[in-house]
Amino acid sequence: MTAKIVLENLKHKPMRSLLSILLVGVPVTLILCLVGLSHGMLEDTQRRTRAIGADIIVRPPGSNLLSTGGAMPAAIAGALEKRPHVKMAVGVLNALVQGVDLYAAGIDLARFNRISGGFKLQSGASFQQPDDVMIDEYYASEKKARVGSYLNFLNRQWRVCGIYRGGMLSHIVFPLRVLQDVTEHANQVSQVYVKLDDPANTDAVIHSLKSDPGWGVYKLYSMDDFMALFSTNNIPGLREFVWVIVSIGVVIGFAVTCLSMYMAVLQRTREIGILKSLGASNAFVLRIVLAEAFIMGMGGTALGVVMSFGAWWLIRTLLPASIPMVIVPIWWLYALGITLVGTLLGALYPGLAAARHDPIEALAYE
Amino acid sequence: MNNGHIIQIRDLRKVYRLGKVDVPALRGVDLSVPPGEFLAIVGPSGSGKSTLFHIIGGLTPPTSGTVRVAGQELPGMTGAGRTNLRKRTVAFVFQKFNLLPNLTARDNIAVARYLAGMDSKPGPEFEEILRLLGIASRLDHKPSALSGGEQQRVAIARALVRNPAILLADEPTGNLDTENSKAVLEILRDLNERLGQTILMITHNPEAAAYGHRTVHMRDGRIVEGM
């Protein structure tokens, strides 16, 4: 009977109910999109780095997961190739070319193809001229670019010479020498990918390098260790940022529900009086209000999940390279918990106000 | 202090506080009602009739005096105790019907049973009451689709579905036309005669009061005639 009263209450003012559910759903979408973006960016970078096929990554001192922290001499690659078990070492220079997270890579294409197995060209050819750039299918789709199109990076026009299958290294690649000149990093690279004669020697090679004072200043990672770093916990400030957004979600859910239920309680003052005259306890009245908020929270979460799929589709269609968003289903549960906390807290005050209504005054309410 | 009376009231006083002013609503009411009586209470507005009902029905506590309803002492009773009294012992029928507008007539009746902690399906004797009230075919309508007379009959059915010891009818014909008023009063009298239902009815109308076994008159918070 409680469920029937609650459902009929929600049906009685459908526009109010739907608007409340929509407003509860918006922060859910916000949270899911933010989490989807952070996970998507990490997973995308992780996948493209792993696809290179290296066993060890060498990065400059002071680098972290998102930033190389500067450049190091390109000659390091040659020096590494003289170490035992090192089959090949290839330096790559990174340069930020768009927004805050779209990096291009400068590569020696012939050497990079040898270590990675090569880019799979879908159209066009590899670098022919100094102003040539290769882009992957996602970036080509985002920019509606084709072979022969011109794109602006680093204050220069670049001709798209080839479009390759996405999923390796970067969405945009330049000839290493050209990028070094343009970014004024002559003879420097951001990281070196090292291929060993046998992956089983990875730990031994890293140990050997770390015990050498000349190499000890560099950041040395096995590919597995480097991949393990790709977690939201390892991105400076990201976890805190997610918590801020989650808190905003709770506050919005709280405020929307509090306002909506307070209005509903005011509108139903007489009905509350009727229920009390029939013997409804304060707890029963509170339960009705909380149950209504619970349904609004559940509905808002469901709508938020649906809207996050809409946002995912939109981003994937419009910005497939710049914003690699993914759907993270476990966060549906977290979002539900966050929303229910917000909505139930929001319903508590109006619920208690309803429960404390004097039945005689409530019955006299017009 | 029982003497076979279902309601016994001695020197009942009720004072409401409006801001910083004390407003006496009842100034020493004495009243005894035997089980099965149909009692009419008449009096001008502000005479304390509704306050007397609200106290007997457990909607508000008395300020002082003795009130015993179906063996339960109301002074000192907690809010939860008064809630239980409204669940199982007394039932109201109001002038404005006071049906829940979002629920059908059937669900309005079911809510009362649910709150009283009774089975969802009433017994066969309730079918007889529905037949008597003449609303069996209107139970799946919401109040907005029912006439005033039908709404008041549903309200009576809702009150009786819990088998209350006392039915408190606060001007039950106040919002009805003559024909429906007569029908409702005859239903109340019929219920009283057939089921022995104790009924207390507030009314302004002397013709309506005549349906009762006895009439008491109230003025200025006291019973002035018919104790």
Image (spheres, rainbow, N blue to C red):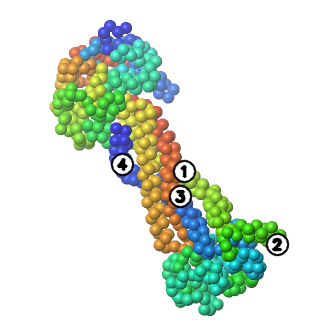
Q: Look at label 2 and name its amino acid.
A: Gly
Q: Quadrant of residue B15?
A: top left
Nearer the observer, disc 2 or disc 4? 2
Q: Could you say where residue A14 lies in the image, as x and y percent from the top left? A: 36, 51
Residue at the spot of label 3: A31
Q: Could you tell me which residue is drawn at 35 percent across and 33 percent down? A: A274
Q: Could you tell me which residue is drawn at 66 percent across and 71 percent down? A: A199
Q: Is residue A302 above or below residue B96?
A: below
Q: Could you tell me which residue is drawn at 49 percent across and 73 percent down? A: A318
Residue at the spot of label 1: A251
Residue at the spot of label 2: A214
Chain under disc 1: A
Q: Residue furthest right?
A: A213
Q: Quadrant of residue B127?
A: top left
Q: Look at label 1 and name its amino acid.
A: Val
Question: Distance between the Cα atoms at labels 3 and 4?
Answer: 28 Å
Q: Nearer the viewer, residue A297 or A136?
A: A136
Residue at the spot of label 4: A13
- Locate residue A33 relative to residue A66 in the image: left or right: left
Question: Distance between the Cα atoms at labels 2 and 4?
Answer: 74 Å
Question: Distance between the Cα atoms at labels 4 and 1?
Answer: 24 Å
